[in-house]
């Protein structure tokens, strides 16, 4: 990501934000001598894109990041989406079973089961040493949301699997009776802990959103669970899933808006580049999906299109959050700016 | 509130009982760093840290760029043009800079060429071995632990490369080796400490810019050094990470700097993410409750239609 317009390695760059354009050519035998051209003077080096902290660019060491970017790959945002959907499907399934809506319950348990089955595979494949995945259950640490989350995922898998199998195969209803309500209670933890996981970091756009991110993830989980189950369920039985999807989509829009507003300057990654495009696409699809489902609820086609849009919107929103973390880590201004403000006020 | 009371993990040194040793660390006095990189080389040699060179960076004499899985010591080269005697076009943009310029004019300790106001600041960066270590708190496997010396070390036989510590460090110290899949960082030469030897970087440093020892001793020495530099007119000398009340409860490896931390690529006010964790968990609990309520509402709404 080039946010400063000076990413060319041959540029004479500055350290400490003191005008280096004048150093060019007289920096002794340093490798900077005569290579490229200075891209500007002092604070005006922002280039094409505007700086993210309007008060003037904080100092940095050759514009290098202060914090490291995540080493995670595509599996992680995928898991945020799939795991979140599974976590919201469990209470939907249990509530459906409890209200006698067996058709809905079966499909919701199916979505929950598929989600918790895929999740560990995604997480393990992202590890640097996948064969050591069991080390995740070596300890329980409340200071590590990833440790807490590993146990939450393990608990959800353990509870959802028997509940879903009992519901789908109509066997062993006692197991379902025991595991169902527990899975329903544990599910939302699976949907929201991932927000705590990213918020517990040195990456400003994640850390500063720690109060709102869990709501964004909960809303996205509700939207995607509702939408996925709606797609699978006959219209006559799908009412609650449809309503959950619409409400989740609307809540997701509100949560995303609130998060970006509260982040202030730190929200800039959501306004440009890849995370910006993803965030815009997510909002457009969630809004369109919720509207289509609400307005066309008596038409099978409209409901399907709406559900598809809500699923895509929720997935895009997770991807936007994930990508925003990379952009936020890449620019030292995001890290240094707020810290400097804190020290001086 | 003490660091121990704030922090939920069993506090060192109680966690080690009678095996606990005095807390050791580094005092890196950048005012005498000459940028020779002997520390980088010694660290690589002793610890068998793989080579990772990307050619010339264009960032002064710094071609190793930053700390990471394959750089446990990193020497920064800050090139600054500082106007001498107020001559020149660029106006001072803060009192700090002004004071820094004044100091250069009057004393010029770190000036490479006093006549044209050009100077290098050099600093050997390293893992801070924080009192409240974000990496240690975040590690889900227990691979990262606090040693009997109060240092923070990754156990490579346990690390499964989840990468969570990478984003938890406010200093960007840890990283994953792409070929190896595990996370690596400075161990403060844990193996050498077992044999009462000082870490390789400190032993190799020819100017004693890197000083190893008991933290309490180092802190007293550093305070004296700052005082002396101030007496000599180097007003910009300041300690970084020597305060127990900072956002990470104080560094085990702290620094004497001649400019603001961010000039060296260091965060000016680092805070361990763990301190904000209760807020995040509380928000997640509220969001979970809201999700359950939303599901319930979807079924109540059914009767209304």
Image (cartoon, helix red, strand yellow):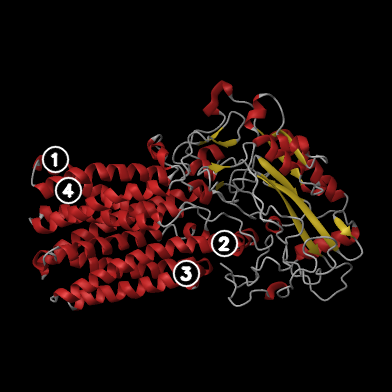
Question: As displayed, is residue A328 above or below residue A280?
Answer: above
Q: Nearer the viewer, residue B10 or A152?
A: A152
Q: Quadrant of residue B235?
A: bottom right
Please identify, in this view, whether the residue under mark 1 or under mark 4 is nearer the observer: 4
Q: Mark 1 or mark 3, which has the lower sequence index?
A: 1
Q: Which residue is mark 3?
A: A274
Evaluate whether residue B236 shows in this view. no
Q: Which residue is mark 1?
A: A175
Q: Identify the disc placed on residue B242.
A: none
Q: Nearer the viewer, residue B182 or B169?
A: B182
Residue at 69 percent across and 60 percent down: it is: A61
- x, y (%) of residue B133? 55, 42
Task: Give the distance between the C-alpha atoms of the residues marked 1 and 2, in whole angstroms.
Answer: 49 Å
The chain holding disc 2 is: A
Circle 1: element type: helix
Evaluate whether label 4 is on the same chain as label 3.
Answer: yes
The chain holding disc 1 is: A
Residue at 28 percent across and 54 percent down: it is: B289
Evaluate whether label 1 is on the same chain as label 3.
Answer: yes
Q: Which residue is mark 4?
A: A164
Evaluate whether label 1 is on the same chain as label 4.
Answer: yes
- x, y (%) of residue A267? 49, 68
| Pointers 3 and 2 in contact (C-beta within 8 Å) | no
Q: Which residue is mark 2?
A: A330
Around disc 2, counting alpha carbons within 10 Å, would you say few (fewer than 14), some (14 to 19), or many (20 or more)? many
Q: Quadrant of residue B245?
A: top right
Q: Mark 1 or mark 4, which has the lower sequence index?
A: 4
Question: As displayed, is residue B9 above or below residue A47?
Answer: above
Q: Mark 4 or mark 3, which has the lower sequence index?
A: 4
Task: Give the distance between the C-alpha atoms of the residues marked 1 and 4, in whole angstroms.
Answer: 10 Å
- Using residue A122 as the reference point, say whether residue A32 is left or right of it: right
Q: Mark 4 or mark 2, which has the lower sequence index?
A: 4
């Amino acid at each position: 990501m080039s946010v400063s317009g000076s990413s060319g390695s041959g540029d004479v760059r500055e350290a400490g934000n003191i005008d280096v354009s004048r150093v060019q050519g007289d920096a002794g035998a340093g490798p900077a001598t005569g290579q490229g051209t200075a891209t500007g003077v002092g604070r005006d080096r922002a280039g094409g894109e505007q700086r993210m902290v309007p008060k003037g660019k904080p100092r940095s060491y050759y514009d290098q990041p202060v914090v490291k970017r995540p080493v995670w790959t595509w599996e992680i945002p995928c898991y945020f989406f799939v795991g979140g959907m599974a976590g919201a499907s469990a209470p939907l399934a249990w509530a459906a079973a409890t209200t006698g809506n067996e058709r809905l319950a079966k499909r919701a348990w199916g979505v929950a089961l598929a989600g918790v089955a895929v999740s560990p595979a995604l997480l393990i494949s992202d590890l640097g040493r996948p064969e050591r995945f069991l080390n995740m259950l070596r300890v329980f640490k409340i200071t590590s949301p990833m440790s807490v989350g590993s146990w939450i995922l393990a608990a959800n898998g353990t509870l959802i699997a028997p509940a879903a199998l009992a519901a789908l195969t109509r066997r062993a209803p006692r197991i379902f009776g025991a595991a169902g309500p527990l899975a329903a209670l544990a599910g939302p933890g699976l949907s929201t802990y991932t927000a705590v996981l990213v918020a517990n970091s040195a990456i400003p756009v994640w850390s500063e959103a720690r109060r709102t991110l869990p709501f964004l993830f909960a809303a996205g989980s509700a939207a995607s669970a509702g939408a996925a189950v709606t797609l699978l369920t006959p219209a006559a039985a799908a009412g609650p899933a449809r309503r959950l999807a619409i409400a989740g989509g609307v809540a997701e829009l509100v949560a995303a808006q609130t998060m970006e507003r509260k982040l202030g300057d730190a929200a800039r990654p959501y306004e440009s580049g890849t995370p910006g495009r993803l965030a815009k696409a997510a909002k457009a699809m969630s809004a369109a999906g919720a509207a289509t489902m609400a307005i066309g609820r008596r038409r099978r086609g409209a409901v399907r299109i709406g559900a598809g849009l809500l699923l895509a919107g929720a997935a895009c929103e997770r991807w936007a959050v994930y990508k925003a973390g990379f952009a936020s880590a890449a620019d030292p201004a995001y890290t240094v700016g707020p810290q400097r403000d804190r020290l001086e006020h | 509130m003490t660091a121990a009371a704030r922090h939920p993990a069993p506090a060192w040194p109680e966690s080690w009982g009678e095996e606990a040793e005095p807390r050791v660390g580094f005092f890196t006095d950048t005012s005498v760093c000459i940028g020779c990189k002997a520390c980088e080389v010694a660290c690589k040699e002793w610890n068998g840290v793989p080579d990772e060179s990307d050619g010339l960076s264009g960032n002064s004499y710094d071609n190793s760029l930053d700390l990471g899985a394959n750089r446990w010591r990193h020497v920064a080269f800050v090139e600054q043009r500082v106007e001498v005697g107020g001559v020149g076009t660029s106006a001072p943009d803060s009192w700090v800079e002004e004071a820094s310029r004044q100091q250069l004019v009057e004393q010029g300790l770190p000036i490479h060429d006093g006549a044209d106001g050009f100077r290098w600041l050099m600093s050997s960066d390293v893992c801070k071995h924080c009192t409240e270590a974000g990496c240690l708190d975040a590690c889900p496997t227990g691979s990262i632990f606090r040693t009997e010396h109060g240092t923070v070390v990754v156990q490579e036989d346990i690390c499964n490369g989840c990468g969570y510590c990478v984003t938890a460090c406010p200093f960007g110290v840890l990283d994953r080796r792409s070929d190896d899949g595990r996370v690596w960082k400075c161990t403060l030469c844990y193996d050498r400490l077992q044999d009462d030897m000082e870490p390789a970087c400190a032993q190799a440093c020819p100017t004693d810019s890197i000083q190893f020892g008991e933290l309490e001793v180092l802190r007293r020495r550093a305070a004296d050094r700052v005082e002396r530099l101030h007496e000599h007119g180097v007003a910009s000398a300041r300690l970084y990470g020597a305060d127990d009340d900072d956002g990470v409860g104080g560094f085990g490896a702290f620094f004497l700097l001649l400019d603001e931390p961010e000039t060296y690529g260091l965060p000016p006010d680092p805070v361990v993410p763990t301190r904000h964790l209760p807020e995040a968990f509380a928000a997640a609990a509220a969001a979970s409750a809201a999700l359950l309520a939303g599901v319930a509402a979807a079924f109540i709404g059914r009767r209304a239609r």
